[in-house]
Image: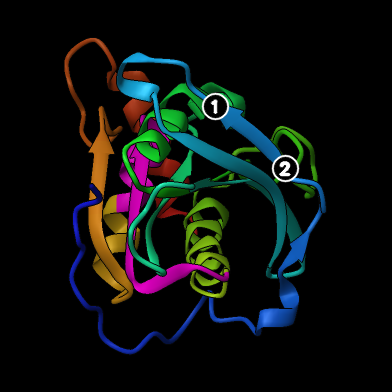
Amino acid sequence: MATRLGRPSAPGGVGVRHRNSIRRTNESSEWIGRGGGSHSQSFVRESVAFDADGTTLRGWVYRPLTLDEDDAPLIVMAHGYGSLKEGLTPLAETFAAHGFACLVYDHPNLGESDGSPRQQIDPWAQVRGYRHAITCASDLAGIDPQRIGIWGTSFAGAHVLVVAAVDARVRAVVSQVPLTTHGSGSNEGCTATSRLFSRS
């Protein structure tokens, strides 16, 4: 059974887009069934694309098929510094098997998402991408826009803390091993990251 997430304030600011900005890129969804264990539930995975300040971001939506409610809670998920959305597949499948829809996507300039220069890491574009992903998720049929959470790991683990602080639509946040402080053994990387975020 899915855990109910709370109710948000009215959305606004960066990330708000009209429904027509969402494009299903794969009309025939991929049906995935798990044959036992904790993944015995079935779910469907659909390709999705959405606009983020003129850049098309691409990913997948995982939908549980066994929910007793019409409007599913959804978790927006994005990868860290050295990964892509494919690395989140096992986690998204686990969440979906337990009743949570997931929107998993590639950050701008990376993976299947558009943007240039390719492979460039732009932290503020990634933060804004999360907010556009929330908008996309809110407009999906069968998703409760008042029960959307965000999940991030590593570099994106820091992003979700920023997004949760500024976007009232976020009802839950998971920040896994976030890059947030100057810890021992990683001072050089954290110093470089701080410089990235301090750019105007």
Q: Is 52 placed left or right of 37 in the picture?
A: right
Above or below residue 135? Residue 73 is above
Q: Nearer the viewer, mark 1 or mark 2?
A: 1
Q: Quadrant of residue 9?
A: bottom left
Residue 195 lies, in percent from the top left, at: 42, 42
Residue 187 lies, in percent from the top left, at: 27, 20
User: Residue at point 53% right, 22% down?
Assistant: 87
- Residue type at mark 2: give it: Asn
Pick whichever, 20 or 71, lies toward us: 71
Whether residue 143 is in magenta: the answer is yes
Q: Quadrant of residue 99?
A: top left
User: Residue at point 19% right, 53% down?
Assistant: 3
Q: Is 31 placed left or right of 7 in the picture?
A: right
Residue on which disc 1 sits:
33
User: Residue at point 25% right, 50% down?
Assistant: 2
Residue 124 lies, in percent from the top left, at: 50, 56
The residues bearing labels 1 and 2 have C-alpha atoms spaced at a distance of 32 Å
Tag 2: Cα neighbours inside 10 Å, few (<14), some, or many (≥20)?
A: many
Name the mark on residue 181. Answer: none
Above or below residue 86? Residue 102 is below
Pick whichever, 41 or 153, lies toward us: 41
Pick whichever, 73 or 122, lies toward us: 73
Q: Which residues are magenta?
A: 141-160
User: Residue at point 38% right, 29% down?
Assistant: 94
Residue on which disc 2 sits:
109
Question: Callout 1: helix, strand or loop?
Answer: strand
Pick whichever, 2 or 50, lies toward us: 2
Outermost residue, top direction?
185
Tag 1: Cα neighbours inside 10 Å, few (<14), some, or many (≥20)?
A: some
- Residue type at mark 1: give it: Gly
Q: Tags 1 and 2 in contact by the CB under 8 Å rule?
A: no
Whether residue 65 is in magenta: the answer is no
